[in-house]
Amino acid sequence: MEALLSLTGVEVMREGRTILGPLDFAVNEGERWVILGPNGAGKTTLLQLLAALIHPTRGDVRILGERMGSVDVFELRPRIGFTSSAMLELLPADEKVIDIVLTSAYAIAGRWIEDYDLWDESRAKALLTTFGVRELGERTFGTLSEGEKKRVQISRALMADPEVLLLDEPAAGLDLGGREDILQRITSYTSDDNAPATIIVTHHIEEIPAGTTHALLLKNGKALYAGSISDVLTETNINEVFGVNISLTFNGRRYFASTQI
């Protein structure tokens, strides 16, 4: 079966400097990936490639059976759910929360003259319920807290029933309670057999949702390790990537890290 996402010999260059690659990477149906690495490792750049937001300088990128450079990305992007802090800033502050989610069905960021039927409204409300913000539907987006906005953005990313879900640091900036709640909700949603393949970027091992199946460790734009999470997420590998002595523990569901003294 063809991979949902595949990169072969991919490089991304900026101002004559390689910021990602050369990189080979593939994601298959049913997999749940985490991408880890220090600042500047290329995590967000890789996610932007997979979201069809940027093109590679070199190499072959195939997304949902289509080759980048040979497909209209505006037709491809609605099949990909994507959240990031940059995307968050593009959502209108004066838009109602329910409309923030609904407009994703048309791949736009603000309500205009498009029509939505009862199925659209029911799905938007169901997603807001899944991520714990159903009661905020009539509030304006700009009045929400950081955590509430992240929940709404994930709901929006899932509105068009994407085949792939890409989450860039979904728990960043949240307090302990907010982090644990959103990770639990992500785990619950992605554990369903009909859920899309998922890739989460994070800086923190504690923010890896339970049920994650694969891991990619990036450093200086290159993949140091990739594969089954149990094989990749080891103390030796983590210490090599982050350059510190880390004690890594796994409680059967989640991973935790602390500095070795």
Image (tube, rainbow, N blue to C red):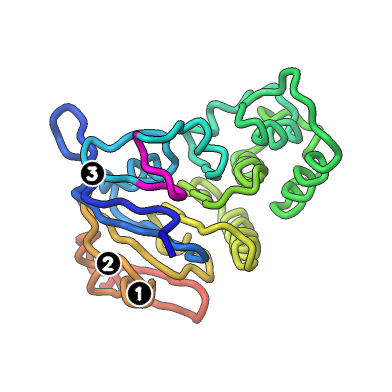
Q: CA distance from mark 3 to mark 2?
A: 28 Å
Say which mark, if any, is on residue 238: 2
Q: Secondary structure at mark 1?
A: strand
- The disc, 3 or 2, on the residue closer to the chain's N-terminal end is 3
- The disc, 1 or 2, on the residue closer to the chain's N-terminal end is 2
Q: Residue furthest bottom?
A: 252
* Pointer 3 with pointer 2, Cβ within 8 A: no
Based on the displayed image, in which of its 4 quarters is residue 52 positioned? top left
Tag 1: Cα neighbours inside 10 Å, few (<14), some, or many (≥20)? some
Q: Amino acid at mark 1?
A: Leu
Q: Amino acid at mark 3?
A: Gly
Residue mark closest to the camera, 1 vs 2:
2
Q: Secondary structure at mark 2?
A: helix
Residue drawn at point x = 37 percent, y = 73 percent = 228
> Quarter of the image containing the N terminus?
bottom left
In front: 15, or 96?
15
Q: Amino acid at mark 2?
A: Ile
Residue mark closest to the camera, 3 vs 2:
3
Residue drawn at point x = 35 percent, y = 74 percent = 248
* Pointer 1 with pointer 2, Cβ within 8 A: yes
| Image position, residue 90 (x, y; %) | 54, 26
Q: Disc 3 marks which residue?
A: 59
* Whether residue 45 is situated above or below residue 9 in the rendered picture: above
Q: Report the span colored magenta.
A: 62-69
Q: Is residue 67 magenta?
A: yes
| Image position, residue 195 (x, y; %) | 61, 60
| Image position, residue 70 (x, y; %) | 37, 35
Relative horizontal placement of residue 149, taking residue 126 as reference (left or right): left
Q: Is residue 240 magenta?
A: no
Q: Disc 1 marks which residue?
A: 248
